[in-house]
Image (cartoon, grey):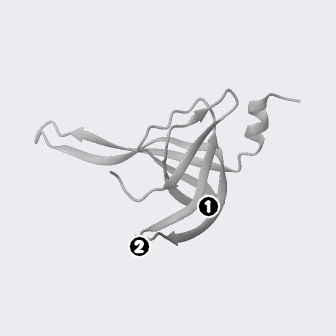
Amino acid sequence: MGTMRQLYERFYDRTFDLVVYVGTKDPVTKQTNFAEKTILTGQPCRLDYNGSPAVEITEYGIAKQQQSITLYLSPDITVASGAKIVVTKKGVSTEYKRSGVPAVYDSHQEINLELFTGWS
């Protein structure tokens, strides 16, 4: 029969890379240079979409998306707030960032995502 964790993992149909933005100080110039650093690659996962991908314009003229995206992944992985999560399926990649606090269970964890629009 298997464990609950094995059950969730059977549905993983994508992979993700975890990317952070780190600063390194140049020993000569003493300037801090920032760059992306991939800290995990090819981790299995699944995405779940809830709602419509349509964009709604609020009464104040602000575009608001009415779709929630949830990433399901191993409970052993820590995804820092602000990290970029690059999800890939069949060679097509989309960049996201964590939105909110992950819900971590023994079998899996769930992270709400939003599209990555740049480093804060």
Location of mark 2 (residue): 61
Q: Position of residue 94 (x, y in %)?
A: 54, 59
Determine the CA span between mark 2 and mark 1: 36 Å
Q: Nearer the viewer, residue 52 or 9?
A: 52
Residue at x 66% of width, y 34% of height = 108
Q: Quadrant of residue 25?
A: top left
Q: Position of residue 33 (x, y in %)?
A: 22, 46
Q: Quadrant of residue 93?
A: bottom right
Question: The N terminus appears in which quarter of the rendering?
Answer: top right
Q: Amino acid at mark 1?
A: Gly
108 to the left or right of 32:
right
In the image, residue 67 sits, relative to residue 7, either above or below, namely below
Location of mark 1 (residue): 91
Q: Position of residue 6 (x, y in %)?
A: 77, 33
Question: Callout 2: helix, strand or loop?
Answer: loop
In the image, residue 113 sits, relative to residue 62, either above or below, namely above
Q: Position of residue 49 (x, y in %)?
A: 65, 56
